[in-house]
Image: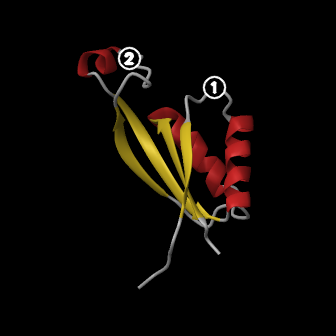
Amino acid sequence: MHDVLLSLILPEDVSRLAQDLLLGRPDLVDGFTATAVDGHGAAVRLVAAGELVSGHAPRVQIQIVGEIAAMRAVIALLREQLPRANLYYWLSPVLEAGHP
């Protein structure tokens, strides 16, 4: 049963490391979607000169649907392996998932 959606927002360079970690854990993650997004707002740390000029930071959003225990294990894995990753995440309930 897939009961939650884990959404991760990461800097582009860190997302590659995170994706490799996820791919290496098929026991926790069946698959995921990665999408390029832009981070906006006061909570987004702008570091590079281009980010300071544009007012936003390029990020990657990774979304994973799975069981809550597995998604919490993914969060723990990322905290352990990428402790300074500037990663933001949230868990949301999934009402339904599947293929038509």
Q: Quadrant of residue 4?
A: bottom right
Residue for point 65% across, 48% down = 21
Mark 2 closeness class: few <14, some 14–19, many ≥20 residues within 10 Å: few
Report the amino acid beneath label 2: Ala
Q: Position of residue 97 (x, y in %)?
A: 50, 75
Q: Nearer the viewer, residue 34 or 68?
A: 68
Pointer 2: what residue? 48
Q: Secondary structure at mark 2?
A: loop
Q: Position of residue 85 (x, y in %)?
A: 59, 30
Q: Is residue 29 above or below residue 80?
A: below
Pointer 1: what residue? 84
Q: Secondary structure at mark 1?
A: loop
Q: Which mark is residue 4?
A: none
Q: Nearer the viewer, residue 49 or 44?
A: 44
87 left or right of 72 in image? left
36 left or right of 90 in image? left
Mark 1 closeness class: few <14, some 14–19, many ≥20 residues within 10 Å: few
